[in-house]
Image (tube, rainbow, N blue to C red):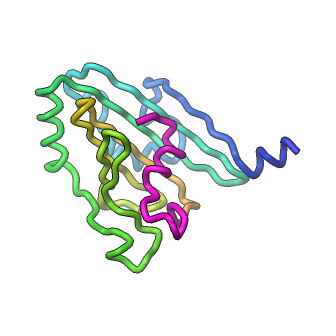
């Protein structure tokens, strides 16, 4: 019975070892490096947190990377302004496409407003960036699972907050 539950529900493994940031040895490393900042690119920060999560269900694996950086007020404002210069964010939603698998490109989890970065292979491989004025924080997230065809259930009009909570193992 326990084996059956394990196979059906899967399992996840999370690492907080920042020394392995963008160097996990998994398929997420190469695409994530195209979007995620390197640690030496970051300005002086007050706090930094890292999560690498690998979820396994039957023969399928998903990988996610989260880097959450807290800044002082001025640095946060500067870095927040740079996001629009350095990234193109998606503007497609399920309402503007024929595919129900395209969620809204912008969503909120607590004090963070997330946007999906454009130019990716959504939903199989994509990045998101969240900002929180309250926390003076920027969260860089990347997801990789080439077996995934859609996000959320058909009747869920806003699946992304649940998706982030399920796959990134971080309490925003």
**How many numbered marks, from 0 up?**
0
**Residue 146 % position (x, y):** 54, 59
Left-right relation of 64 to 93? right
Magenta span contains residue 155: yes
Residue 110 x %, y %: 36, 40
Left or right, 110 with respect to 64, comes to: left
Who's the residue at 17% across and 39% down the image?
80
Position of the C terminus, as image quadrant, is: top left
Please tell me whether the stretch drawn in magenta is mainly helix, strand or loop: loop
User: What residue is rendered at 54% in x and 46% in y?
Assistant: 166
Looking at the picture, tell me which residue is in the foreground, 3 or 153.
153
Residue 153 rendering spot, x and y as whole percentages: 55, 65
Q: Is residue 58 left or right of residue 96?
A: right
Quadrant of the rendered image containing residue 158: bottom left
Give the residue at x 44% y 76%: 99
Question: What range of the chain is rendered magenta?
Answer: 149-172
Write the residue at 70% across / 46% down. Answer: 10
Estimate the x, y position of residue 135 in percent, counting from the top left: 27, 30
| Quadrant of image for the N terminus | top right
């Amino acid at each position: 019975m326990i084996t059956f539950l394990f196979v059906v529900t899967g399992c996840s493994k999370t690492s907080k070892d920042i020394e392995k940031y963008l160097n996990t040895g998994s398929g997420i490393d190469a695409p994530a490096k195209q979007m995620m900042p390197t640690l030496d690119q970051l300005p002086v920060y007050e706090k930094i947190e890292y999560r690498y999560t690998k979820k396994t269900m039957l023969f399928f694996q998903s990988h996610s990377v989260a880097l959450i950086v807290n800044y002082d007020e001025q640095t946060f404002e500067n870095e927040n302004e740079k996001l629009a210069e350095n990234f193109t964010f998606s503007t497609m939603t399920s309402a503007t496409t024929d595919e129900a698998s395209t969620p809204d490109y912008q969503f909120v989890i607590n004090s963070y407003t997330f946007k999906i970065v454009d130019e990716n292979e959504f939903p199989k491989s994509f990045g998101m960036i969240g900002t929180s004025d309250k926390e003076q924080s920027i969260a860089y997230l990347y997801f990789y699972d080439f077996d995934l065809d859609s996000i959320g259930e058909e009747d869920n009009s806003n699946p992304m907050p649940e998706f982030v909570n399920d796959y990134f193992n971080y309490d925003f």
